[in-house]
Amino acid sequence: MRGTAVVVGGGLGGLTAAVALRSVGWEVVVLERAPEFGEVGAGIGVMPNAMRALDALGLGEAVREHGTPRLPGGVRDHRGRALGHLDADELERGGRLVAIHRADLHRVLRSALPADSLVTSADVVEVEPEVRYLVDGEPVVLEADLVVAADGIGSRVRSRLWPDAPAPVYAGTTAWRAVVDFTGPLEIGQTLGPGTEFGVLPLAAGRVYWYAATLSAPGLRADDELAEVRALVDGWHEPIPALLAATDPRAVLRHDVHELASPLPGYARGRVALLGDAAHAMTPFLGQGACQAVEDGVVLAAACSDGASVAEALARYDRERRPRTQAVARASRLVGRVGLGLRNPVAIGVRNALMRSVPAKAAVSGMTRFSGWRPPALSARPVGDPPA
Ligand SMILES: Cc1cc2nc3c(=O)[nH]c(=O)nc-3n(C[C@H](O)[C@H](O)[C@H](O)COP(=O)(O)OP(=O)(O)OC[C@H]3O[C@@H](n4cnc5c(N)ncnc54)[C@H](O)[C@@H]3O)c2cc1C
């Protein structure tokens, strides 16, 4: 069937769902609580699975334009010793990872939606029996055949419709992120030190996204977060010191990492689908949180495109998305434990020896376990061109 959909939340997940649903003929309105659309945050890694989903929507090329060029990549220990390395061809064999500034990705998605489908300062308070939202405290009511709850990890819709679902929990890690102007030879890099990890993802036009994550108590903040990162990775290999030297302290963002540690028993209820972090907020150690939200949007649209009722479409969405996203979340948690989660030198030595022993071919096939995903066909016009 085709009908009307309200998307609650204009983050990366909600916007992708809106673009995908429109591409299969649905009328869509996105309700965003914030006064403006946009993304707080630095860069984001868009894995090959999500790039394929964006390609299916006709948006992949626009993302690649702003994102990581074709590069080699590798993992090192904090002294700079290689634990694994892939040249650009090998990396591409598993599909290309494209890191991009979040604001650019958000803009690319927005450009595929008509301006009048995007409503800001709209705080959704109920979705049953109809969608109710507040604008300047005044209630507005909307009817819709389908509601997509993409309202993030703290989802109000989830707590209303899944009142027994446990709240998100702190994942034991805090993370810093920044995008800096940097010229110099770089690779896609991840460095693992005791209890800490540092990542480098070059973007287009001489910009670089770096992140650092460490085991920590929650809620700690410093006046100078850049100094915190410097102290954390003191003595680590280049280009880490050079990147930090090039960083404006005001550009550094810090967030504690939370996740929905208890998987939900369902992602759909009535005509409401949960999507993205609202359904499966996960740790960032596989770089898959937003990528799974992007997949969600495309699968939801495919399910809604083939003449099925909303109930049948949402049953299919739940069947296809829940096992996969919950498996990715489990794997991400595990990767965090054996990555930055290790502090014991013996355990670190064993892990590093194991990583060094993995041949490139096996590393590529390991990477494709999740990033090898392919989107379902959308019987749709591509939406890469701006709508009239
Ligand atoms: C440190 C860190 C690094 C990460 N790195 C990566 C990475 O490299 N790759 C990756 O794929 N993922 C990454 N992630 C995960 C990724 O950021 C999230 O999975 C993704 O942003 C979730 O998108 P979303 O649209 O589901 O939710 P959100 O981005 O949280 O969007 C929800 C939107 O809903 C709005 N909203 C909330 N309540 C209401 C309401 N009542 N009414 C209306 N609007 C509402 C909010 O204002 C917001 O705009 C990372 C996460 C962290 C913490």
Image (cartoon, rainbow, N blue to C red):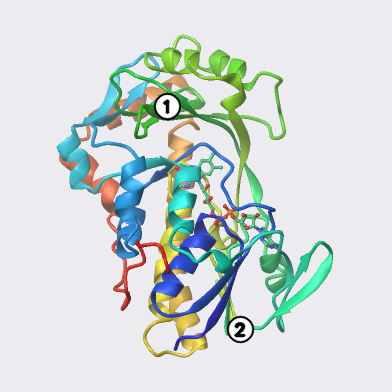
Residue at (32, 62) in percent of width and height: 58
Q: Nearer the viewer, residue 189 or 214?
A: 189
Front label number (1 vs 2): 2
Residue 265 shows in the view = no
Contact, CB < 8 Å: mark 1 with mark 2?
no
Q: Is residue 136 above or below residue 26?
A: above
Secondary element at tag 1: helix
Residue at (72, 84) in percent of width and height: 129
In the image, what residue type sits under mark 2? Gly
In the rendered image, residue 214, in percent from the top left (x then y), is placed at 55, 28
In the picture, the quarter occupied by the N terminus is bottom left
In the rendered image, residue 45, in percent from the top left (x then y), is placed at 40, 42
Location of mark 2 (residue): 270
Residue 30 shows in the view = yes
Location of mark 1 (residue): 347
Mark on residue 310? none
Q: Nearer the viewer, residue 190 or 216?
A: 190
In the image, what residue type sits under mark 1? Ala
Q: How many marks?
A: 2
Find the residue positioned furthest to the front: 388
Residue at (30, 58) in percent of width and height: 52
